[in-house]
Each structure stands twice: as C-alpha cells, then as structure tokens.
Image (cartoon, rainbow, N blue to C red):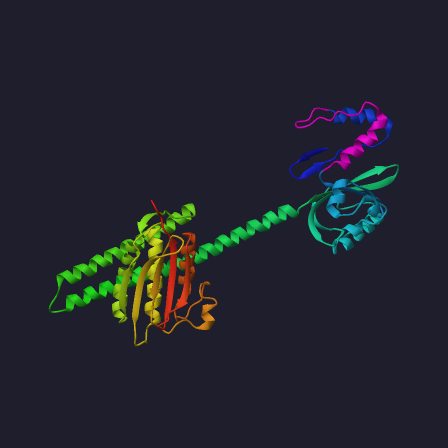
Amino acid sequence: MLYSGQFTFVFVAPCQEDWFPEYRRLISLPAPRMRLAMPSKPGQYRDYLAAIVDGALDGIVAIDETGSILSFNRAATALFGYGQDEVIGRNVRMLMPEPYRREHDTYLRNYRETGQAKIIGIGRQVEGQRRDGSIFPMELGVTEVEQDGRHIFVGIIHDLSERRKFEARMQELHAGRLELIEHMAVGLAHELKQPLTAINAYLNIVRRLLKDQHFSAEKAEDALDKTTKEVFRVSEIMDNLRQFMARGTTDRTAHHLNEVVRTACEFTDAMSKEAGVTTAVHLDANEDQVTINKVQIQQVVVNLKRNAIEAMQGCENRQLTVSTRLAEGDMIRVDVTDTGPGLPDIVKQRLFEPFTTTKPHGLGVGLSVSRSIIEEHHGKLWAEENPGGGTVFSFALPVTRA
C-alpha cells in the first residue's frame, strides 16, 4: 500500500500460490518512493494482504456481482459507522443515498447484460450515507478482480468532507472580501463627501468675498487656508485606505485627543454656520493622550457632528456641544450633544447597522463605520437621549499613559 496525498494505492494480486513468486518479484522491484518486502512463506501472503487492506487510511469495500458486501475494512467502519458484522452479506446500496442507489442498480443490471461496468477504473465524486442517515461527499474508485470465474468489485473510498469544508470556507472568505470591498467603497464615498462638501463651502465663501465691495483679503486667505486643510484631509483619507488595502491595518501613534477633536470640529465650522447651529466646545479632559489613527478618529467626530447638525434642521433651538472628560477605567470620553428631535424608536434598535438612516438621501453607513473604527481602537461608541431634548452620541477610548 502506498498512501500519497488523498489517494490510497492497494496492490491486489491473485491468491493462487503458484503465482506468488512472480508477483513477489514484481512488487519487490525498486520504485521511486517505496519497496515492499513480501513474506518468505506463500501461506502468509493472504494474511499480509489482509493487513494492508485493513490498515488502509481510506475505506475499502469489496462486493460481488449482485452487490453483496464481501469485505469492509476498518476505515470503512469509521467512515460509515457500521460494524463489519452489520454489513457483510448485505447489499452495498445501504451505504448510498438517492439517486446513487438507483444508479448502482442500473450499473449492476448493465453489467449482467453486457459483462462491462462503465465505472471500473474511473474516479468519481459521489455521496455516501452513514448509519445515522447523514450524507457526506466522497471520492470513489472501483477496480474489478476475477477469481475462479467470480467477479469481485473493490471500491476505494476517500472522504471529501474536510476538503468540501475548506472549499466552502474559501468561498466564504472570497464572498466576505467582496462584501468588505463593497462596504469600503460605500464608506469611502461617505467619508470623502465630508471634506469635499467643506471645500465647496469654503470656495463659496471666497466667491462671495470677491463680489463684496468691501473685500477682505484676510477672510479670503483664511477660507483658502481651510480649503487647503480639507484637501490635505482627503489625501490622508486616501492614504489610510491605501494602507488598509496593503496591510489590512492603519498606522496608530500617540496623540492628544483634545487637539484631535478641536481640529475635527473646525472641519465642520462652515457647515454649522450655514445651518444656523451654535457650537460649544468644552475639552475638559486633563489627561488626553491616546494611541490612535488621527484621521480615523477625526472622521468619527466629523461624522457625529455632521449628523447632529443635520438632525437639528427645522428646529428652533439648534445647540451643539462637543466635550471631552475622563471616565472610569482609564478612559477618555467624547460627547456630541444636539437639541434635535431625538431618535425614532424604530431606528434605535438598528442604529449602528449598515444602511440604517433617517436622512432622505443618506447612505446609512456613517455610524456603522464610526463604530467599527472606535471598536478597532479598543473603545466603545453608543447613543443616549439628551435630557434636555435631542441625542447624545458618545465614544470612549483608553488613555495612553507614559
């Protein structure tokens, strides 16, 4: 027997003792990977061959012309769950589910009529049925042995269950990667929309300033400086995406979270003014060093602030507060509080699921992406009702101590 990869090769020789020396000579010929030393006494040959078959790693089942099982090795016992005494003498159909059971009857009938079996020497992927009724995939190879005018069919069975599981897992990984790329594309469109919207707003400010009779070069320069920052932010977002696609992660370094939050708030100052929203920033956390990807955390703050601004459209009271404070467990907490209408009950249950939104033209991925970013930084993102009316979105990150 030679076991290589997924196949078991069994050398079966006729049992006539006068042929034994010749077969002993043939099997003992040098081979690239094996040499079998045969027993010195011909009477030991049958036991030797039986030991080889019974010790094979693949199932080996022998049947006669009627389909009755003649032998059943230990691997077949483990594979199908039947003991040898339960299958010997019974029809091999008991090991087959439909439609293979009907096909086997057809093969035997054709063999009795024509003397030929089309499945001989052909490896096929079929299915077997265990004692408990479960179905499993297998690879079946069949060979024919003639002894004293009697035809015996030997089937070699290799279980494909693990291979199929591996293939299914690879398909899942492939599908998961496609889904990840899809979500990243949607998320990228969402994240790029924010700085591009800000760039457009700053350019509109410059355009209005140029038309003003009392043109202010300082105001125009300030707007252009902010435009440049937004362009640089777009570049950073694209760099983050490139890093993630190349390495599956992004760089994280030590930063002061108060400064990161302050800069992120500046990105949406123009949007706040255009929407008539009054913004207050209270950065009260006295220990604020965190290990983060700065651009990603800024994206979270900008997204939460932008959502709050849009939520307060049409409200009389438009107050937005962004604050930081230390929380229990060596965490620093950031709160983005609005005075909008609050969250509908139907939305609360699915708030952080992808494509959940209350906006007419929203993509519904901002909160989902934001939560993923915070959790990847070993933090937590959640939402609460504002006691004064509206919603408080909060996230907490672990403080990095020297």
Q: Is residue 347 left or right of residue 124?
A: left
Residue at left 77%, top 24%?
25
User: Which residue occupies the foreground of this view, 67 or 399?
Assistant: 399
Q: Is 50 one of the magenta-colored residues? A: yes
Q: Residue furthest left?
A: 214
Q: Quadrant of residue 396?
A: bottom left
**Any part of residue 59 in sight:** yes
User: Which residue occupies the foreground of this view, 276 or 164?
Assistant: 276
Residue at left 32%, top 68%?
309
Q: Is residue 392 left or right of residue 60?
A: left
User: Which residue occupies the foreground of this view, 257 or 107?
Assistant: 257
Q: Residue furthest right?
A: 148
On screen, residue 304 above or below 102: below
**Any part of residue 363 in sight:** no
Residue 162's x, y, as percent? 64, 46
Q: Quadrant of residue 299?
A: bottom left
Q: Residue furthest front?
A: 328
Residue at left 32%, top 52%?
288
Residue 297's x, y, as percent? 35, 55
On screen, residue 124 above or below 17: below
Quadrant location, the N terminus? top right
Quadrant location, the C terminus? top left
Q: Is 120 one of the magenta-colored residues? A: no
Residue 106's x, y, as percent? 79, 53
**What segment is highlighted magenta in the picture?**
29-56
Residue 258's x, y, as percent? 29, 55
